[in-house]
Image: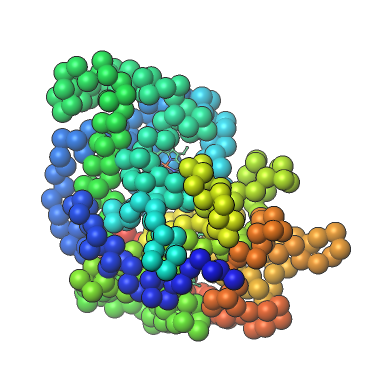
Amino acid sequence: MTPFRTRQFLGILSAAALLSLSGCGGGGGSEASTESSTLSAQATLGEKIFKDISLSASGKQSCASCHASDFGHAQDNNLAAQLGGGDLTLQGGRVSPSIRYLATNTSFFFAADGTPTGGFFWDGRASSLADQAGGPFLNPLEMAMASKADVIAKIAQASYAADFKKVFGDDIFSRPDEAYERVKLAIQRYELEDADFRPYTAKYDAFLNGSTQLSDQEMRGLALFNSPTKGNCAGCHPSAKGADGSHPLFTDFTYDALGVPRNTELAANADSTYYDLGLCARNTGDLTSRTDLCGAFKVPSLRNAALRQAYFHNGKFKTLKDVVTFYVQRDTNPEKFYPLKADGTVDKFNDLPDAYKANVNTTEVPYNRQAGDAPALSDTEIDDLVAFLQTLTDGWTK
Ligand code: HEC
Ligand code: HEC
């Protein structure tokens, strides 16, 4: 049971609805790739800060280290979590996601029907890109700087320090807290203005524009992706153009509990009493009473998913084929994904305490099956679906 979401409508409407809500000039659209690449002075600074490894305790890590542009602005490796801290030996808690196609995301809210929606990070705890950007510099598992003032002192020595003063005032470095707020806004401007964060240059975009065909296999995969009785993927990862012609983002920015298996690659999981509970446990503390939301994580965009080498919030699966197989066989063949308990039964949804296992979505296609049923997709159909997902990678050329 997932009383907290009613998705069928939202899945189809939300990309367009969110686009129309966007007043920040960063809205998506199919024309982004033809935009001029000129960034505002603030965004230009934001780009320099985003790529500046000197703003880390290790002196070796920048935002771009974990959000690499060649990998859809996500991590460039198959680790469950990236290493950070002063000597780059401390493991983070979650997969580093793609940060493309976020311009139309909003702060977290409950939709009228109660569906948790929006917010940044896997648990929606940051309210905006700027709010998010304040985190990594000071996170001891990431860039691990000691204080805001330390970050600003480094910027005051950077090659772009004079530009920073020009944009934010000659005496800005004497007010580190204010300067830090400017840093956050500059990064946000960069993420909103630079079309690299929303190029819409996938083969599927060309297909939607009518300028190319998908192969027979890709077309079969698209049909399976959309079919409410087969993949039903579009229910949470919308694939259709918005009413305004905007291209789909393949996320509705909602949340769901999928029951992804526990990943022992995460050091924190060595403690058998530790669980990453997602939404209900986020550090803003506002949802602690909503135990029905424990285990729920944000629906990520599937654009550029084919470039990834670790999937889901905990990086449990390493290939798209494994992800799709999990979706369709989780309930029919749970022994393939979960370990056995002492009594020999399968420890299904083993990354959640027993009390929250009922939060996992077991009502919607493709996870509405029982052990022994036929999976929603055959092996060939899984391959077709993966072929379709590969059409969502930016930078496609004929
Ligand atoms: C050590 C790796 C690492 C570094 C460095 C890092 N990030 Fe991230 N980033 C992550 C991880 C991991 C998450 C997901 C964390 C979570 O959900 O709890 C994330 C999440 C995000 C998100 C939210 C994406 C979404 O879908 O809501 C944005 C935006 C982002 N990072 C931007 C940045 C910026 C800007 C910087 C530099 C100031 C930065 N990151 C530095 C690993 C990193
Ligand atoms: C009921 C909503 C829902 C449906 C239906 C759904 N997904 Fe997802 N999807 C999610 C959520 C939520 C996550 C993140 C879960 C997590 O990390 O714990 C996710 C994550 C993913 C990821 C990992 C992306 C990444 O960057 O790590 C892929 C790939 C994916 N889904 C593909 C599919 C496909 C293919 C289908 C159809 C077979 C599908 N999804 C159906 C909600 C859904």
Residue at figure coordinates x 57%, y 52% from the top left: 289
Front residue (pair 238, 5): 5
Q: In this view, does 201 lie above or below 51?
A: below
Percent of width and height locating residue 179? 27, 25
Query: Compared with residue 394, is residue 391 higher up or lower down, i.e. above or below?
Result: below
Q: Which residue lies furthest to the right in this view?
A: 343
Q: Which quarter of the picture shows residue 68?
A: top left
- x then y, percent, for residue 224: 46, 80
Say left or right for 356 vs 217. right
Quarter containing the N terminus: bottom right
Q: Residue at x 48, y 32 (%)?
A: 139
Residue 362 is situated, as x and y percent measured from the top left of the image, at 60, 72
Residue 392 shows in the view: no
On-image quarter of the C terminus: bottom left
Q: Nearer the viewer, residue 336 or 181?
A: 181
Q: Is residue 346 left or right of residue 366?
A: right
x%, y% of residue 317?
58, 58
